[in-house]
Image: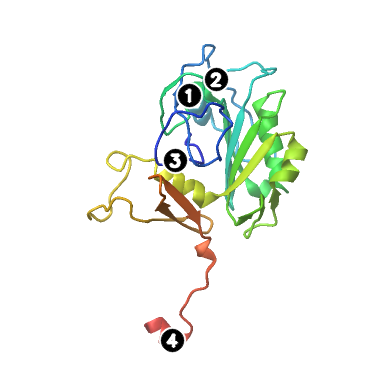
């Protein structure tokens, strides 16, 4: 699964794996986890979301290999893409101590559990996270979490436009026992993911044109709503992504005259 935050350049991790602001840089592929096997495949219960088919379960087994004991005492990370319609959750191990190269994907031997849920079946996003962590089967909550949410994030809080959810990072830290939760806009997350792609291997060109290095980048995508963001290059040569929620702007034409224009 692609991380919900992805930097434009891949670098070695800082001295502490917890240092730095989430969303700016991501360390690379760690050394293989020695006890790797297959990850748990949770069975969805009534009202818990979309139940995995046998084929989907088999695909998850191939994609997840960090088979941990339920009483594993090490650090774990939780990431989620929280849209207006569904939530995609991923629980994985942090990067290892010896890092040589970085990839844009979470290595299979670091993924513990992943699943997705229909938001209509839950009263709050906290209920979604509780369901996911229960299915993951771990005794302890993850140490850190980053949630990419479909809305404006102000001081760790987001009011969803398309549903009645209010997500507060500080309140969820208390409710879930997670040490630190970071909320970012979902299209800021999309932007950091997009600028990590190889334009020659992982992108489909719609209109050929000369690429001007360092120019601003527009990120637009249709989901439950219309997501919009833009990226600009900073003084250090890395792109910074800025969410806009421009999809909530009013349609400009009013009346027959302006519509014809």
Question: Which tag is nearer the camera, tag 1 or tag 3?
Answer: 3
Mark 2 Cα-neighbour bin, 10 Å: few <14, some 14–19, many ≥20: many
Task: Kindly give the residue lying farthest to the bottom in the view shown.
Answer: 257
- Sequence-wise first label, 1 or 3: 3
Element marked by disc 3: loop
Spatial separation of the CA atoms under disc 2 and disc 1: 7 Å
Mark 1 or mark 4: which comes first in sequence? 1
Q: CA distance from mark 1 to mark 4?
A: 56 Å
Find residue 239 and report its horizontal and vertical position in percent: 41, 48
Q: Looking at the image, is mark 2 or mark 4 nearer the viewer?
A: 2
Label 1: how many Cα within 10 Å (few below 14, some 14–19, many 20+): many
Left or right: 158 in relation to 205: right
Determine the secondary structure under disc 2.
Answer: loop
Q: Earlier in the sequence, mark 4 or mark 3?
A: 3
Residue at image mark 1 = 108
Q: Nearer the viewer, residue 204 or 21?
A: 21
Relative image position of residue 74 (x, y in whole percent): 64, 20
Separation (CA) of disc 1 from disc 3:
20 Å
Lower position in the chain sequence, tag 2 or tag 4: 2
Q: Which element is circle 4 on?
A: helix
Residue depicted at 41% across the width and 30% down the height: 103
Q: Look at discs 4 and 3 and give the one toward the viewer.
A: 3
Residue linked to disc 4: 256
Mark earlier in primary sequence (3, 2): 3
């Amino acid at each position: 699964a692609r991380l919900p935050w992805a930097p434009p350049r891949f670098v070695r991790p800082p001295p502490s794996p917890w240092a730095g602001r989430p969303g700016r840089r991501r360390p690379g592929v760690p050394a293989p986890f020695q006890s790797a096997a297959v990850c748990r495949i949770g069975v969805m219960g009534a009202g818990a979301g979309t139940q995995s088919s046998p084929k989907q379960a088999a695909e998850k087994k191939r994609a997840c290999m960090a088979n941990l004991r339920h009483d594993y005492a090490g650090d774990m990370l939780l990431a989620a893409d929280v849209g207006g319609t569904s939530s995609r959750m991923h629980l994985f191990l942090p990067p290892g101590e010896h890092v040589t190269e970085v990839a844009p994907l979470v290595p299979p031997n670091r993924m513990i559990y992943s699943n997705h849920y229909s938001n209509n079946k839950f009263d709050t996003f906290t209920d979604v996270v509780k369901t996911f962590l229960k299915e993951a089967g771990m005794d302890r909550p993850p140490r850190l979490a980053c949630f990419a949410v479909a809305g404006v994030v102000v001081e760790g809080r987001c009011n969803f436009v398309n549903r009645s959810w209010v997500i507060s990072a500080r309140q969820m830290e208390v409710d879930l026992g997670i040490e630190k939760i970071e909320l970012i806009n979902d299209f800021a997350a999309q932007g950091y993911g997009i600028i990590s792609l190889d334009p020659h291997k992982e992108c489909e060109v719609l209109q050929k044109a000369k690429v001007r290095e360092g120019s601003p980048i527009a990120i637009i995508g249709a989901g439950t709503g219309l997501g919009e963001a833009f990226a600009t290059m900073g003084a250090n040569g890395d792109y910074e992504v800025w969410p806009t929620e421009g999809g909530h702007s009013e349609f400009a034409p009013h009346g027959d005259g302006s519509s014809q224009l």
